[in-house]
Image (tube, helix red, strand yellow):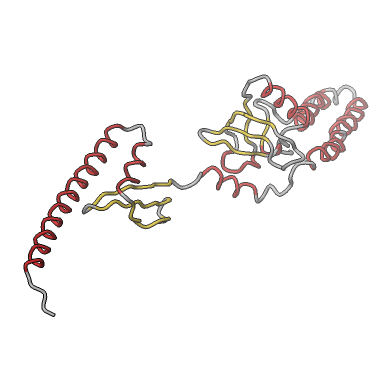
Amino acid sequence: MAAPRGLSVDDIETLRSAVSSGRRPKVVFTAAAGQIAGQTGQVTAVGDPAGADEFISVRFGRDKLEFAPGDLQLPGKAPRRPAKPAGKPAAATPAPASDASRPAAASTAKPAATATVATPQPAAPAAKPAADTEPRPAAARPAARRGKAKGPAELSVTLTWQDGDWSVQAQRGSRVLAKPTPVRAADALRMVEMLDAPAVSDAVGEIVAAARDAAAERAEQLRRELAEVEARLAELPQID
């Protein structure tokens, strides 16, 4: 039996109308979607099929991903075409019961059952052109879908104060993007002031204020030492 072939043109228009009216219709991922097959997502946007193969935006958990029509189907929508041949042979089963009383009826019923089973066969290629408009390389899609579901690695930016100096570093997952780089105390204070964290801003402010007081005290000490050196120099006579 053929697997579900994804969304039809009518299904896509139904989803587009639902999203336009403010709703978030549900869809089920087909086997073409890879490891998330059989799970449910919510359609948030239906784009232009002429612009890209994957033009249907679906929210799955916390992720918002793009899918092609072949990756999706409407909930509860079973493949109708394979169900018809399953029902027809059941109608032909009474033929053996009437075989004992009327052999001619059984012989005529069997060709009729064979004909009805055969008639859906041309219908499957007739439905192919609609499916052929979808992107065919489904084998490569599951691997790409796994990469999207994983999401980007975590990015960490750290501001550090140690031994009187400020530095900032950045890391994405296990990869170091920027080694500790020195920053001025004023820049460090501006960074934390942009955060909605008064306790952090106060702590940084105290460190900057203490560093400023220490620098001012050191500067005053150097001025006194310089004044003493200049006084001593003035007492020494010049020798021509």
Q: Is residue 31 above or below residue 45?
A: below
Above or below residue 183? Residue 44 is: above
Image quadrant assignment for residue 38: top right
Residue displayed at 33% across by 55% down: 182
Residue at figure coordinates x 10%, y 64% from the top left: 229
Residue 13, percent from left and from top: 75, 27
In the visual, does 150 lie left or right of 114? left
Residue drawn at 77 percent across, 40 percent down: 50
Q: Position of residue 27 (x, y in %)?
A: 63, 29
Q: 5 or 190: nearer the eye?
A: 190
**Between 63 and 217, which is closer to the camera in this rendering?**
217
**Residue 23's quadrant in the figure?**
top right
Horizontal relation, residue 208 to residue 61: left or right: left
Q: Where 144 falls versus 11 (above or below)? A: below
Q: Residue furthest front?
A: 240
Comparing 137 with 194, the one in front is 194
Instruction: State the image coordinates of residue 7 (x, y, percent, origin top left).
Output: 72, 33
